[in-house]
Amino acid sequence: MSDDEQPEPPKPGHEAPQKWTRRDPAAEGPGPVPTAAAGGSGKDNGEGKGKGKNKRPKRTGWRRFVPRWRIVLGIVLLFALLLIGAFIAGYTLVSIPAANAGATAQSNVFLYADGTQLASDGEINRENVQLSQVPLTVQRAVLAAEDRDFYSERAVDPKAMVRAAWNTLTGKGTQGGSTITQQYVKNYYLGQEQTVTRKVKEFFIAIKLNREETKEDILAGYLNTSYFGRNAYGIQAASQAYYSKDVEKLTTAEGAYLASLLNSPSAYDVIAHPENKPRALARWNYVLDGMVKKKWLSAPERAATTFPVPGKVKPRAGLAGQRGYLVEAVKDYLTSNKIIEENTLATGGYRITTTIEKDKQDAFVKAVDDKVNSKLSPDRKADRNVRVGGASIDPSTGKVLAMYGGIDYTKQYVNNATRHDFQVGSTFKPFVFTSAVVNDSTTQDGRPITPNTVYDGTNKRYVQGWKGTPYNPANEDDTSYGQITVRTATDKSVNAVYAQMAVDVGPSKVRQTAIDLGIPAGTPDMPNGPSIALGTATASVLDMTQAYATLAGHGRHGTYTMVESVTKDGTKTDLPSQDTTQAVSREAADTTTSMLQSVVEGGTGTAAQASGRPAAGKTGTAEQDKAAWFAGYTPDLATVVALMGADPETAVQQPLYGALGFPRMNGGGPPAQIWAQYTKGALQGSDPKDFDLELQDGASVPVEPPPPPNPSQSEPPGRTQGQTQGQTEGQTQGQTQGQTQGSTQGQTQGQTQGQTQGQTTGQTQGSTQGQTQGQTQGQNQGSTQGQTQGQTQGQTQGQTQGGTTDGGTNTGGTDNSGTTTGTAGTTTGAADRPRGSRSP
């Protein structure tokens, strides 16, 4: 076609075909893209199949590992379909079952270690009521405590369940994410087992139940099936158990307290566990504040509400005597060690073999009856306040072999062996010394602390090196002891010495050693100061028994156990292992034992000798004589006994002045006597064992310090020599000759030899020196006879012989025979004096 020729315009409806350009990313560079008009055929031209189609660029780097959005969407949709399918299947397959056996709970059976029956805690206490019988404020108190949005929420709360699971996984504690509906399903239809299967069933049954029953019916069912402690199932039984009234008569304050118990009955019962009152008050306040927040209680009404102290427990007759104390102690052991959850245990059906040995348990009861209960008199007002607690542990296994909880579980509910509200007194002092050895501690002037280290035992002496508030504790009966060894200070329980030692060691180190030995870290009143040595801590009798069992076991400690085995329907429950660790060094534990042997042999605990066994122990007395303790052990049995004073009506602690006819109550009296009789009976038939001790360096040889020098007088050489020789020989000879022989021989021989040898020499010197020194040494040795004899004989013989010693008077004269024999008389007199009984 020539240039003059024009193409015909396209006919209407027949547009000319458009030219196309192939899009090739590789060709979008410098060169043009060939087209059909330019001679391209529009086909692949043999350059590869599909080369003419659009291609997605390949991913590089980290993008290669990120799935495309289509894949993500597909996974999400598939997961959602699976969830929906699982939900439909679960909802279809899980039906609402009949009430479980837990709704009419079984009994638990408790056995002695030999398999004989100890007790059964059957006869479940439950009485169902209508919701209309429960005051509205009590209903709302329960909702404020457990599920404040119950009436507006769904049957399940997925967010709460996820939050609870997350808190549990991240170590913030096991927390519940269940609504009241779910809890009712668990109580009535299922069980308390913490399994995935049970949680899944609970989820679907709660949803179905919420569609088939009203909220009011569900709340009524929850109130009638929940466990409130004291063997009370349901709000009516709880109202009777705690306040001795029907549920209709409960006040708002009482309802709030019962609602608090739902969280953990044993943790908030302020009568069974007086030490729990601060925690119970906090929970009670939480409930009432929640009612105010939901506008169920006005602020003025809230301000006027006071804590309603519940009444005393009314245990069942089947748990009379010691059985109830033992059963409750075993239950506490199982739940506190998370072996069985409290509500699960309450449903019953368990067969529990304890570590309690019946013959030892009977021996403990008999010892308390013989030494205390049989001597109580209605004519003595203080006797009504007397309570006894005791526990006994095998140091080699950690098993609790016997326990004394009180006069009778049905009369006195609180277990005196496990309560934590009485000071332990001087039974804490051995922990101070043990810590000194563990930490290689020294005195303020750098001397290693051993049983033979000398301390100042002056009454009300201010503690040195303490940067806190000045502290100067009084000794028992305000007695001053002067310079004494640690061993003697332990025998006599000298507060001034041990307060100083606590600072020398470091109060925080003392506290840690006590914890290592077995005292719980949360024990109240273990201060970071010198007073920690005096036993302000309120550890339980069982806690103290653990700690002394560690000393008896050469410093090895394992958590005590009260349970040998637990089975239900033939299936055994796993128990925690009883592995022991070296809590403190053997030499620290054994050196402490050697000093505590001295307490029994000649200190405040001599009454323990009646056990007829090698024994170590320590007495203790709480402030105002509100408790008296004896903690002791043989190589194969550790036992602690405490007498406590508490008003039988109010439970307020009371002094024991005048109790059992004693002006003062101390650990060396009835507590040590009970200990001795029990230990003798418990170990009857076995051979006595001696302690096998490995002592710290410098602890094996007892050394008494010399009397302190008188700084106002010079020490003549003759006097020093006479004192040393006379005291040494007099102690040795006086122990064998006796007071009479020493005194007579000293007078006769001294006068005769003095007249012969010293008539012409030293009349003036003998008069002065003999008189002065006779007074000094006689006073130092505390013997009235020695002082009088020293004054008289020293003056008479000194005038005639000019330099002799007699009756405790020492000079540098020539008559050594008179010196030695006279001193023997004075020494023997002091040694033969009866030791007064005092047991701080």
Image (cartoon, rainbow, N blue to C red):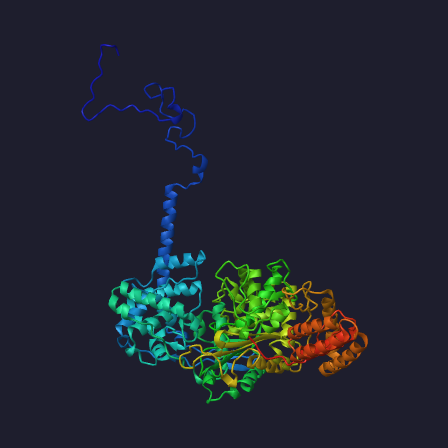
Task: Pick the quarter of the image with the C terminus.
Answer: bottom right
Give how far across and how far down residue 379 sits, in percent: 46, 89
Q: Is residue 271 left or right of residue 396?
A: left
Q: Nearer the viewer, residue 501 or 358?
A: 501
Q: Nearer the viewer, residue 214 or 734?
A: 734
Task: Pick the quarter of the image with the N terminus.
Answer: top left
Q: Is residue 92 visible?
A: no
Give how far across and how far down residue 58 sits, in percent: 42, 33
Give how far across and how far down residue 492 sits, in percent: 60, 73
The quarter of the picture where residue 161 lies is bottom left
Extreme right residue here?
756
Vertical relation: 66 (above or below) 98? above
Extreme left residue here?
12
Q: Is residue 754 visible?
A: yes
Q: Nearer the viewer, residue 511 or 541?
A: 511
Q: Is residue 57 left or right of residue 12?
A: right
Name the residue at 30% across, 76% down: 250
Vertical relation: 55 (above or below) 237? above
Q: How many marks?
A: 0
The quarter of the picture where residue 46 lies is top left
Name the residue at 31% across, 24% down: 20
Give how far across and how far down residue 267 sits, in percent: 42, 70
Q: Nearer the viewer, residue 556 or 500?
A: 500
